[in-house]
Image (spheres, helix red, strand yellow):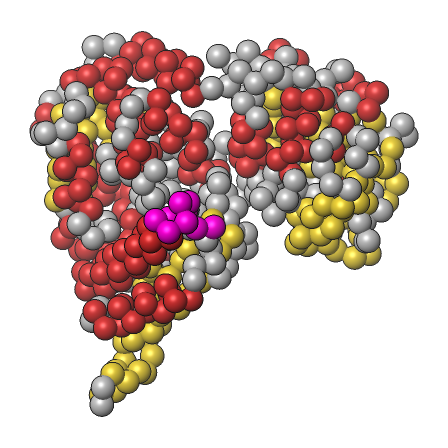
Amino acid sequence: MKKELVIVLDFGGQYNQLVARRVRECNVYCEIYSYKTDIKKIKEMNPKGIILTGGPNSCYEDGAPTYTKELFELGIPVLGLCYGAQLMQHILGGKVEKAPVREYGKTEVQVDTTSKLFKGVEEKTVCWMSHFDYISKPAPGFKITGYTKDCPVAVAECEEKKLYAIQFHPEVLHTQEGSKMLYNFVRGVCGCCGDWRMDNFVEEQIKAIREKVGDGKVLCALSGGVDSSVAAVLLSKAIGNQLTCVFVDHGLLRKNEGDEVEAVFGPEDPYELNFIRVNAQQRYYEKLKGVEEPEAKRKIIGEEFIRIFEEEAKKIGAVDFLAQGTIYPDVVESGLGGESAVIKSHHNVGGLPDFVDFKEIIEPLRDLFKDEVRKAGLELGIPERLVFRQPFPGPGLGIRIIGEVTEEKVRIVQDADFIYREEVDKAAADYKKEHGEEPSWMPNQYFAALTNMRSVGVMGDFRTYDYAVALRAVKTIDFMTAESAEIPYAVLNKVMNRIINEVKGVNRVFYDLTSKPPGTIEFE
């Protein structure tokens, strides 16, 4: 399956996984390695192309992440992004220094459309800049093929040696034609034909799971979300009734969600698996009592998550493996598998306690992004309504409630969230009925969160002192970057009225306009 390989060398950039995601969009498999990876190993892997990520350092300073000059002499196409571009130029004899004007945000870049990298790209194209150093002089043999008002070397290339240095970030959605540029590199410059497909992935994973598990028993963490559902069905296809799926209702789910999950995977389900529901609501509320710090809440939820699984495993007898629906964004934001800084820990990545009473953890979706998970789900025959279900974080409403989690706060955010999703879905359905297509504003994820802010209000003739609910809605492809969705004001106004009138304890409703970056999609 992995006949073609593009390597992403990580220099500490926050977008390292996103670079890989964009390459895979081109149906080309790629793997991420630290810049500390030896050149010998890279030669052995024989990649079709190499991409150097961004990073927070200055390449000309002592101790800054670097690489051997030999990398650029292998005859393998190399694309440097931001720090990676600066490092390439620095190593090959160019000059990198502190920029007189720092560029951050959307910037118009003038590019040379005769370059293979910019085939089909507009001469003036909007790109995402984020740098305080710049290339003041390109390395010998390099031609400038892109510039901005404040950056004279936005792109430099040596076509003969297939070396390309890009100062901006083509991998983020803010760069309007970035996907086209990366496609031009991996499919055009590198000559990849594109043999990374989900049908092959599913077949290979089923085979790998059977080989690993043998006649052993597997306990799967099933939340009912897209990731864990696809993982469960994949395991079911591979090992059938050797699989037990435990659904932990921690009391932090969306309204009615526990019953909905049981309806899909319970005794009447079409899948060959053993389903167990554990109602642990009060147990979680007690553990979370008085805890306000976001990471502390995540750790507690992760700890209980594993302890409950250990308890259930003992009830059903010997269990050899624990299976989880961990995916790539979970890994990158937890700071694992590269040089990136920690954004936040996930209950199923790095938040697990040291002692886990299983031989091994199986994570069949660990290398996939969300859209790849959905494609795998369709390949497995999972109903579209489940495959395209809105994502929900493992720690659940615990990270959509700012500050301490209480049963009363959970009720508030459940009710507010239900109203919000109901009205957005209704408005979208009405639009589609009238126009024959989904509205352009339809978000990929939308939910209500409860702030820890209380303020004075008035309802009728009475003073109130209640909570503020924040509504979040984003449009995204990969969940690594996102823009705020422009939901019509009339819809938001209706949501606001219903929440204030129907949800006891709320007297204000906010709408979060923040993009990712600088924010995250979730609140904590």
**Residue 469 visible in rendering:** yes
Query: At x 65% / y 22%, what residue is drawn?
Result: 187
Closest to the observer: 358 or 326?
326
- Please tell me whether residue 316 is drawn above or below residue 442 in the rendered image: above
Query: At x 20% / y 10%, what residue is drawn?
Result: 215
Q: Is residue 461 left or right of residue 94?
A: left
Bounds of the magenta span? 432-440
Asked which quadrant contains residue 455, the reply is bottom left
Query: At x 54% / y 29%, what residue is drawn?
Result: 25
Q: Is residue 408 left or right of residue 344?
A: left
Q: Does the magenta stretch include residue 437?
A: yes
Residue 73: percent from left, percent from top: 78, 18
Query: At x 42% / y 35%, what residue is drawn?
Result: 370
Q: Is residue 85 magenta?
A: no
Residue 467: percent from left, percent from top: 30, 72
The extreme bottom residue here reads 461
Q: In this view, does 420 lie to the left or right of 54?
A: left
Residue 457: percent from left, percent from top: 31, 82
- Please tell me whether residue 45 is drawn above or below residue 506 in the rendered image: above
Residue 294: percent from left, percent from top: 37, 55
- Please tell me whether residue 502 is drawn above or below residue 460 in the rendered image: above
In the rendered image, which quarter contains the C terminus? bottom left
